[in-house]
Amino acid sequence: MNSYSAIQNYQQVNVQSSVVDASPHRLIQMLFEGALERIAQAKGSLARGSFVQKSERITKAVAIVQGLQGSLSDTEGGELTANLDALYDYVIRTLIQANQSNDVAKLDECAKLLGDVKSGWDQMLDTQAAAAGAYS
């Protein structure tokens, strides 16, 4: 086994153990992190002219965003859920366009949109943790 394969195996085991131990809120954070990481990797692949790898990374980012979209509750959240659903749909379509046209600006736009939502999610979790700490 070469060192690259060993690193990949370690990373996969590390991710799997993190998922097993994670709360539902942390799982959503991990999905955001994964999507943002794949977009950054796609940009790097594009810069190196590695179009196959770029397509693989964007395809993985699309799958992650679809997972985020699928996690939305149809019965809870009302307008917020509808807005997130529309945003995720837009990000998916824009990622596909970026893949087809090799457009870094579209990748940047998707990263910014997902980063903004992740930031709000992180703040919500920080607020919940602070409130829980105040009551213990």
Image: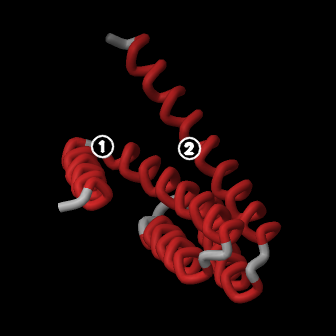
Above or below residue 41? Residue 57 is below
Q: Residue at x 23, y 50 (%)?
A: 10
- The residue closer to the viewer here, 7 or 105, is 7
- Furthest residue toward bottom: 100
The answer to which of marks 2 and 1 sits earlier in the sequence is 1
Above or below residue 35? Residue 25 is above
- The residue closer to the viewer here, 36 or 77, is 36
What percent of the width, then of the height, locates residue 91? 67, 72
What percent of the width, then of the height, locates residue 74? 47, 72
- The residue closer to the viewer here, 53 or 106, is 53
Residues at circles 2 and 1 in contact by the CB criterion of under 8 Å:
no
Q: Residue at x 43, y 70 (%)?
A: 67
On residue 23, which mark appears? 1
Q: What element does badge 1 sit on? A: loop
| Left or right: 132 as drawn, with respect to 116 | left
On residue 121, which mark appears? 2
Q: Circle 2: is it few (<14), some (14-19), or many (20+) Cα within 10 Å?
A: some
